[in-house]
Image (spheres, rainbow, N blue to C red):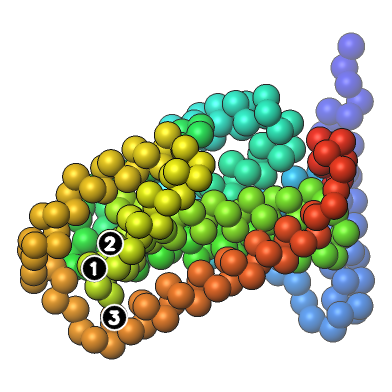
Amino acid sequence: MNDPNQHPDFEKRRRNLQSVARKMMQAKAEAADGKPKDGATKTKSRWAGKLARWGPVGVLLIFVLGKLKLVIPLVKMAKLQTLVTMLFAVWVYAQIWGFVFALGFVLLILIHEFGHLIAMRRMGIKAGAPVIIPFVGAVIAMRSLPRDAYVEAFVGIGGPALGTLSALVCLLIGFSTDSLFWHALASTGFLINLFNMLPISPLDGGRIVGVMSRWIWLIGYILGISLFFLTWSPILFLILLLGLMGLGRTLRGHNKKYYDIAPSKRWKMGMAFFLLLAIMVLGMWTADAQLEGIHPATQAEPDV
């Protein structure tokens, strides 16, 4: 039996009606705010409206995808291995925290890694797509090396900077919605980036402080070792072991030209490092303050 909807005249009338409807809606919207809306704005509004129906997950996706300047390079840089490892990580973490929080957690890690990728692109460094490893974090393979310590520090601070921004957005959403889910996600985001700011190689903090003074690494290892004895974290032990293996050679002055950086760049990176640390600590303290006194049964079911 022929479908009347497939008749050429019917299809033509349907397209005409749709075109008229779109024009009327556009004219109505322009009259409301006094300025025309281009195709990109209409498209953005459509997908934003659909994502908003997904609740907190949709809002988080809107934040990640909303910046068009970031979407284009992120889509180009994202590979199949990133998607596969991301889905696997979400599945693993979902066994512990549930799907919604696991998805938010993995997205926070992915945003952190995209911060590194964006910084690499700006510095002209080639790199592979991020690979997410459950209970470890994520790794990006550099296909070319930074030319000096400042470039390495710039790439290193890119991840915590964008990661902290995403945690701040979660915190603001938490205050605007009075949702424990978003406060918990914000606190977790700040913690992830704060841990990465430990001045220990190969963590981001170790890459950043090298441009200021390599002797700061000694302070970092004292803090790291103290933290290890408090937490007995096997991941932290592995990081400390890897870093200590190359610490002696670096402190003896290996590749001095690599660390020959203008004082102005050292000061700028140092100020950015400590300012970012302050934002993380304050942000995590603020998020944790909203979660204090919550009964464990309440924490088991996130308030979305």
- Callout 3 crowding tier (Cα within 10 Å): few <14, some 14–19, many ≥20: many
What residue would you read off at disc 2?
218
Camera-nearest residue between 213 and 148: 213
Going by the image, does 48 lie left or right of 250?
A: right
Closer to the eye: label 3 or 2: 2
Image coordinates for residue 55, horizontal then vertical, percent: 83, 47
User: Residue placed farthest to the top in the image?
Assistant: 1
User: In the drawing, does residue 195 fall left or right of residue 67?
Assistant: left
At a point 59% along the width and 50% down the height, the residue shown is 108
Graded by Cα atoms within 10 Å as few (under 14), some (14 to 19) or many (20 or more), the crowding at tag 2 reads some
| Outermost residue, bottom side | 264
Q: Is residue 108 above or below residue 67?
A: above
N-terminal-most mark, 3 or 2? 2
- Closer to the camera in the image, 160 or 277: 277
Q: In the picture, residue 200 is in which quadrant? A: bottom left
Closer-to-camera residue (252/47): 252
Residue 46 drawn above or below residue 296 = below
**Spatial CA span between label 3 and label 2:** 18 Å
Q: Is 34 displayed left or right of 44 in the figure?
A: right
Residue at (75% x, 71% y) in the render: 37
Q: Are marks 1 and 2 in contact (CB under 8 Å)?
A: yes
Q: Earlier in the sequence, mark 1 or mark 3?
A: 1
Q: Which mark is residue 60?
A: none
Of residues 119 and 209, the one drawn nearer to the viewer in this rendering: 209
Question: Regarding mark 1 in the picture, which secondary structure is present there?
Answer: loop
Question: Disc 1 residue type?
Answer: Trp
Residue 217, given in percent of the width and then of the height, sits at 28, 62
- Residue neighbourhood size for the residue with mark 1, other residues' Cα within 10 Å, grouped as few (<14), some (14–19), many (≥20): few
